[in-house]
Each structure stands twice: as C-alpha cells, then as structure tokens.
Image: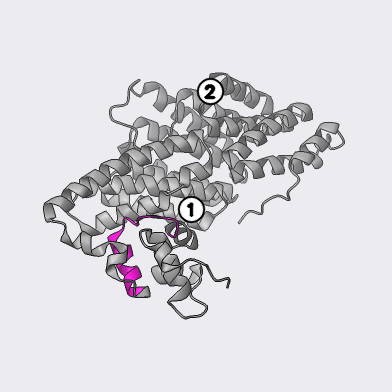
Amino acid sequence: MARSALTLDEAIGHHGKIIKYYRHFVINPPHGWTQEQLAEALDVSVRWVQEMERMPFIQSVARRKALTTIFGIPRSLLDLEEHEKLSHHETAHLQLWVIDSLEVAIRTRWQLYYTSSNSVTEEGLLNQIDILEQLADNGGVDERRLYRILSQSYQLAGSLARDNFHYSRAKKYLREAQRLAQEAQLPDLETTAIARQAVVLLRQERFEEALTIYQRAASLTTRTQYYVGAYVYSGLAEAWARNKHQTNYKTESYRALDHAQNLLAHGPSILAEENFTYVRLTAHSLEDTRGECYMLLGEPKKGLEYLQKASQKLDLTMNRRQCRLLMQQAEAYLAAGQPDDCVHHTLKGLQLAQALESPGNINWAREIHTKLLDSKGQSEPVVGKLGAAVIDPPQRKQ
C-alpha cells in the first residue's frame, strides 16, 4: 500500500485528513488500514469512507466517536469536546437548523436528478443521510418529518444506484426508504419506494417479479395522492407489457394505462399538498409510457405517435426524461423498421446520457446498436456510425 506524505500538522483542522492520517500511520504500522477495512469496521460502503476522508467537518457525532474508538484519535482533534459543552437548548436549536437545511437540500437534489448529472446529484448525499440517521438516533426532534426526509434521501440514493447498475445496493436503499415511510405512516412515500423497487427489477429484466411488486404497490394506492397512483399504474402497464407469457398481458397493460390517465385527468390541477415523492408525473409525461407500451405490445407506429406527442410537450429542462424519451423513440423506430431514424434518436439520446453521466442510458444506446446488428438494417451506414459512438463493450446486467 502506498504511504501518504500527509503529516499530522497538515491534517489538523480537517476531519477527513485526520482520519486518513490515522488510517495510514497509526493502526497496524507500517502498512496501516485500507479503506475497505475501515468501511467494514464502520459498517458502511467504501465509497462512503472515500467521501468521508474528503470532509473538512464530519457532522455525525456518533461517527466521530466511533472513529476515536477505532483509531485512538484524541477527541479534541474531531471537535468532540466542544460538542459536549453545548447546552440542551443550543443542541435543539442546532438540530432544527440542520433539519431545515437538509430538507431544502433533498428538494434541490431531486431537481438536479431530473436536470443535471449523476455526479452532481449524489455528491455529499451519503453524508447527508448519515447526518439524518444521527439526528434520528439522538431523538428530541420531529421524528415524522425526519423520517420523511430520510425516505426521500434513500429513494434518491436508490435511483442513482440503479442507474449505475448497483442493483443490490439500490434495493437495499429503497427497502430502507419503504421501512421509514411505513413507520412514519407516509403512504405516498411508502408506495413510491415499493414502485421504485419494481423499476430496479425491470432494469434487471426480472419482469415477473417486477409485475408482482407493482401489483403490491397498486394495492396501496387507495391511500395515496392521485399522482402517486398514476405513477404506479403507469409502471404497472409497462410490467404487464413485458410479461408476454401472461395470456391477458395486453388487456391488463391497456387497462393500467387508462387507469393512470383517469387518475391524472380527475385529480386536482393544483396539488392538495407538496409533492414529497418527486415522481414528476403529468398527463403529458404519461404519453411516453403509453407510447412505449404500444411499441412493446407490437404496435410501433401507434407507439411512435404517442412518443412524438410527448416529445412536443416535454419540458426541455427535464434532461433525464428527455434522454429516456429519445431512447424510447429509437426503440420504436427500430421496431418499425426505420434504422436511420432509430440511429438519429439514439445518437441524440447518447449525447445527453453522456452529459448526465447516466450509465443506464449509455448502456441503452449500446443495446440498441446490438439490436440493429441483428436486424435487416445491419448493413446500413448509420449503424456503423452508431457503432463508432458506442465503442465500449455493453455493460452486463447484474
């Protein structure tokens, strides 16, 4: 293991550097500990350790105490003595301020998720989750509010992990989000956490399991806001469309789509309360799901009509949704036997996916190229153009 040139004098005043110094030089000299060993000792991911070592100040008091125990770090170096001098009133005031800040932060992160890159969205997210967990452990705060913010945070972490092909981690985060929402009696968040688990299964092409999970989520929608119900039933429609071994898959897919549309059509034009689930589903955006389902159900031309309508009405600031829509159109053009249009939309989608740093959508472009190579249009020059753009080998599904 390469030894760091970091000195203790250079590390003082920066929590992450202090931990890095003690990890390298104090435990088990002369080799120190690896980040993997520290992650195991703290029961966190290696990625979280990497992020922690970049933090000037670690908010979690429990984490700092654990580190002093593991490494024998003097408590003063991790600012634990000052924390213990705070009065109860000062601590409560600080906790409220932190919760307010984290509530704003998760709202901003979800907006970034739809409009910006994965790395920008997830920078510091695990640290925020750790702070929230510590506040929950300390007690004395609005537990229901805290659990709501935690559930929102875990659902975002799960969505990002899914997009990075970390499916096991995604499901772990989403199950924790579901548990927190259930304990706090937040049916909207509980239902979206379950539905997002189904999305992970769809990405893994475990279609039958995804259908079962979506059906479970659908059974809870009698207690949710109308837009949550519409979100669940739009996903259920796709799950039915992909379960072609079921004798009634077409009928059930169309029925789920109609039900989602009716929920949106009859729901209030202004939400009764803030949309805490961040599903961002509207009557316009539902058209892309309908278009994809028609394509999956063997009606690519009809599917294209809906996808083109959705494209015309799309809010262009929603970059992630725009990327998905371009890939859906590419799939529909491929099914309709129009390779030129397929490649055109795939290349546009790929360019946007690369800007978003979205491995899932980048891989989607590779999969479309593979399908083109197996199609009648395999010899078309545009297929080679797409092949040059997707040089890296396809990601394997886990």
Classify 90 as above or below 31: above
Find residue 39 and report its horizontal and vertical position in percent.
Answer: 45, 67
Classify 251 as above or below 31: above
Q: Is residue 6 visible?
A: yes
Q: Does the magenta stretch include residue 144?
A: no
What span is in magenta?
53-70
Give the mark count: 2
Which residue is denoted by mark 2 in the rendering?
314
Position of 144 with respect to 165 (left or right) is left
Find residue 62 and report its horizontal and vertical position in percent.
Answer: 29, 63
- Between the residue at mark 1 and the residue at mark 2, the CA separation in whole angstroms equals 28 Å
Crowding at label 1, few (<14), some or many (≥20) Cα neighbours within 10 Å? many
Position of 333 with respect to 225 (left or right) is right
Q: Is residue 248 visible?
A: no
SS at circle 2? loop
Which residue is denoted by mark 1 in the rendering?
170
